[in-house]
Amino acid sequence: MKKGLLQSALIISLLGAATSASQAEVRIQGAIDFRESIMTTFKWYMGPMGSMVKGRMPFDAELFKSRAEGLVKATRLDLAEGYPKGSVGDSEAKPEIWENWDEFEAKIQSLRDEAAKLQEVAATGDEAAIKAQFGETGKVCGSCHKQFRSKK
Ligand code: HEC
């Protein structure tokens, strides 16, 4: 009887440990889902602007303005929150992110800055300046990916 109780206590505590481990995994997966959905949102706004810049779509100043505005709003989300320490999980995030956290955060900030500039320039309707600033914005995406995203 006593032994049985001890055994069930042990089983319960083991179950408890297993549950908390999987809860941590769930939290990591939640963070990954969060950051990847922000990335998908970035892509949603960048896509049509890129097509206009590359001439695959006629340049439409109003559409450009609204996409730039959407991008600015998306950059206000706290992307850093989606990268809890060591949360590589099943994602393309490189461990270098947490070894160079300040640099990673600086890139998040420079995306905010470049997107804000893009929104300002988009409001002027100056096509050449808009295209140039789109390039600057895209460079931030590219430089962060080059340094911190693994190719699977
Ligand atoms: C601060 C660094 C950083 C910036 C800036 C950044 N990305 Fe990313 N991006 C990443 C990392 C790291 C990944 C790998 C996926 C992850 O983190 O889970 C990624 C993944 C992605 C993905 C794939 C998402 C998926 O579901 O796997 C897309 C699309 C993407 N980024 C688009 C963009 C665009 C567009 C921009 C610019 C407007 C941008 N990113 C800016 C770091 C960044």
Image (cartoon, helix red, strand yellow):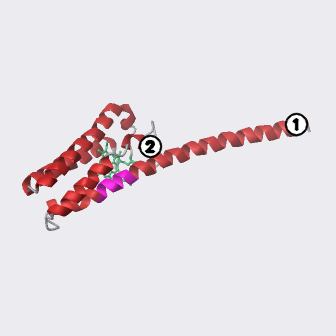
For image coordinates 11% across by 50% down, the residue present is: 132
| Amino acid type shown at disc 2 | Val
The residues colored magenta run 37-44
**Mark drawn on residue 56:** none
Give the vertical position of 89 relative to 44 (above or below): above
Q: Is residue 81 left or right of residue 27?
A: left
Taking the magenta stretch, the answer to whether it contains residue 98 is: no
Q: Is residue 135 visible?
A: no
On the image, which quarter does residue 122 sit in?
bottom left
| Amino acid type shown at disc 1 | Lys
Q: Position of residue 117 (x, y in %)?
A: 18, 46
For image coordinates 15% across by 61% down, the residue present is: 61
**Mark drawn on residue 3:** 1
Secondary structure mostly seen in magenta is: helix
Q: Position of residue 22 (x, y in %)?
A: 60, 45
For image coordinates 46% across by 41% down, the residue present is: 87
Quadrant where the image shows the N terminus: top right
Q: Residue furthest right?
A: 1
Q: Is residue 96 left or right of residue 117?
A: right
On the image, which quarter does residue 131 sit in?
bottom left
N-terminal-most mark, 1 or 2: 1
Taking the magenta stretch, the answer to whether it contains residue 42 is: yes
Q: Is residue 130 left or right of residue 140?
A: left
